[in-house]
Amino acid sequence: MGREEREEKEGSMGNRGLIRTIAGNGEPGYSGDGGLAIHAGLNEPKSLTIDQDGNLYIADSENHVIRKVDPRGIISTIAGTPPTMPGEASVPDGVDCSSPPMAGKTGGGFAGDGGPATTALLNFPSGVAVDERGHLFIADTYNHRVRKVDLTTGIITTVAGTGVMEAGFEDEHAEYDDQGSRYGIGATPGQGEETEDNVKMVKTSSGEWTFIYKDVAEAAGKDWESIGGGEETPGPVAPLESPRTKEQKEQKAPGPAKLIQIQPLRKAPPGMYFALETELLEPNAVAVDPTGTLLYIADLGNARIWRVDLGTGFIEVVAGTEKTAGTGESEYNGDGQPAIQATLSYPYGLAVDLEGNIYIADTFAFRVRRVAHATGLIETVAGDGKEFYFEPGRDSQSIARPYGIAVDAHGNLYITDATNHLIRKWERTTGRVKTMAGNGMEGYTGEDSPPLATSLNYPTGVCVDHNGAMYIADTFNNRIRKSEC
């Protein structure tokens, strides 16, 4: 067997050894697209997920990109603009680097919605999830957004978040048109003379400013004085700034203005908001339910878990209380209550099982908690609130700060213990917690050896495929490891 044939066999994602590297050469950097993933440069990968065809997706966080490793072991970049120098991102023309979110950052940024994902900018992507319909969801952490890549077309869009780095969310009583834009934007303007009193400028759900006309609004039964009030609008605008076409301006018919067209307005249901108008604060993890219609977001800075209906664009809180919004942390306040009344403490990880139950890495509470799909009640399934410290030969039901979590087809949980350099498993049938990988020693050892004899270095991501194989984001080793367990 020749060297290239041997490397291809070793680099593929097939069955070989107990634990081994399948991506990353151990050196922090960006390199290797189009070749074997074991020779590629990764830079602190934080999260990973695998699709039904065996393609592995990696949040290559410090490179501000998403990488894909196919079943042959070939790596490519499928979202984000790779850095041109260590710690820097290649910035497309027209992107302003002097203002947030790029100001003061070493690489990363926001750009590219509606275009190819490979020319977009991401900013420290920390979480990824893939559905069975061919959509990849990205927790674009420092852009305070969740992005979606259509894996068929390669187009990237935002599905939640405004990009505003603030805690909280917008008024649930705001009105929108059927495209999700505020105050009926998207309507074809009606006729009538333009003055400072009958043209207003309002903000769309995409964050851009546009115009709405008094005659159009009133013909639709809207109160002109109440439209665009507050901080959402800078007030009336001069007639010359109006976007009406020349032909429309020349239509000066006597009498009442004639309505040409307006989109029907809609309101978010009680307790729900529009995902594109909701302010997220450093979303760190995403998960998709088994139907592929619901997206869950771990909103780290707001200490909440959100659920997005991907069909309507509505979003709602399913766990966490607003009492600690913006702090990221709170004291544990008990189980057996509605999850929306429970406090969370830096929820870093997220998973959803086949029954629709939500698992939350309640990181600084030293627990993993479950929200029952049927009742919405929250309970602790792993951890007792005491921090776990590794000792050789001894397991404990306590857990250290859990970061990434994953659930397998049997409902068992895999938990990254970055502090102790371990991967641990909670067994659903027994409730037991045991160590699955890592010897508790920081470092890199143990290729093709038993998982418990292997040194990891601050692993923060884990996923499991349909065969039960475990994939580990060995973050500070700049590698992806695979264990056939």
Image (cartoon, grey):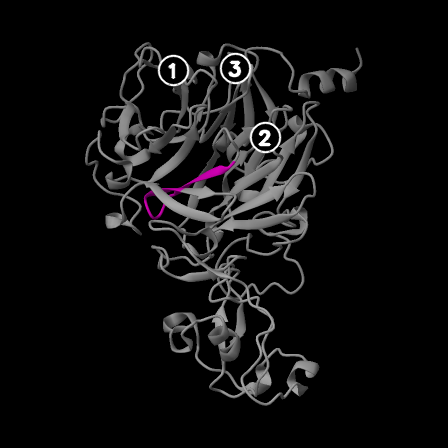
Q: Is residue 169 left or right of residue 122?
A: left
Q: Nearer the viewer, mark 1 or mark 3?
A: 3
Do labels 2 and 3 touch, CB within 8 Å? no
Disc number at residue 132? Answer: 2
Please say whether residue 305 is one of the residues in the magenta stretch: yes
- Which residue is drawn at the image coordinates 40% and 21% (left, top)? 413
Closer to the camera in the image, 348 or 354: 354
User: What is the spatial separation of the Cα atoms under label 2 and label 3, in whole angstroms?
Assistant: 18 Å
Give the residue displayed 59% in from the left and 52% down from the top: 121
Residue pointed to by mark 1: 435
Of the numbered discs 2 and 3, the one sitting upstream in the chain is 2
Residue type, mark 3 in image: Gly
| Residue bearing mark 3 | 468
Q: Nearer the viewer, mark 1 or mark 2?
A: 2
Give above or below for 356 relative to 210: above
Badge 3 element: loop
